[in-house]
Amino acid sequence: MTPFGIFLPQYNQLSLALVTSKLTADCIVDRLEDWWQQVKAQFPHIRRWVINADNGPENNSRRTQFMHRLVALAQREQITIQLAYIKSG
């Protein structure tokens, strides 16, 4: 099992998903979509997401599948998605 978490620090809220597959670009965006469908009624005022990511191979901003899926999600849900990568080294 591979964990994938979404933490909302302002609300002290954590959502955790366990996936049986490898964490891929598609898997990450699928989990984000599932999470948003579950909570968007609770947060109708949220129009901007800041995603803190580790810049790994599955969520790198040069990863075209990841970016393509995020852009499609943002357009469909009419939200702004900002990527904030953890600086290594």
Image (cartoon, grey):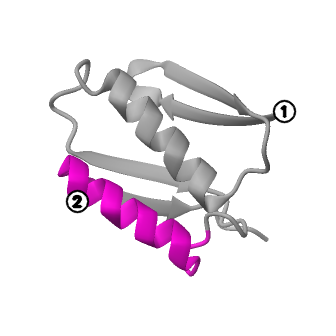
Q: Residue at x 48, y 19 (%)?
A: 13
Left or right of residue 83, residue 75 in this image: left
What kind of secondary structure does the magenta stretch mostly adopt? helix
* Residue at numbered disc 2: 75
How far across and how far down the image is residue 55, in percent?
65, 66
Image quadrant assignment for residue 6? top right
Residue type, label 1: Met
Q: Is residue 81 visible?
A: no
Does residue 45 appear to the left or right of 10 in the view shown?
left
Q: Does residue 52 appear to the left or right of 87 in the view shown?
A: left
Crowd around label 1: few <14 · some 14–19 · many ≥20 (10 Å) = few
Badge number at residue 1: 1
Provide residue 86's location: percent of width, then percent of height.
63, 61
Q: Position of residue 7 (x, y in %)?
A: 52, 31
For the residue pair 40 and 6, the one nearer the viewer reads as: 40
Q: Which mark is residue 39?
A: none
Residue 83 lies in what quarter of the image? bottom left
Vertical position of residue 20 compared to residue 75: above or below: above
Dot placed on the residue nearer the N-terminal end, 1 or 2: 1
Is any part of residue 17 visible from this angle?
yes
| Mark 2 neighbour density, 10 Å: few (under 14) some (14–19) many (20 or more) | few
At 53% across and 67% down in the image, what residue appears?
66
> Residue 36's x, y, as percent?
37, 33
Q: Amino acid at mark 2?
A: Gln
Quadrant placement of the C terminus = bottom right
Residue at the spot 22% in from the left edge and 21% down from the top edge: 41
- Residue 32 lies, with reference to residue 10, above or below; the image says below
Residue segment shown in magenta: 60-81
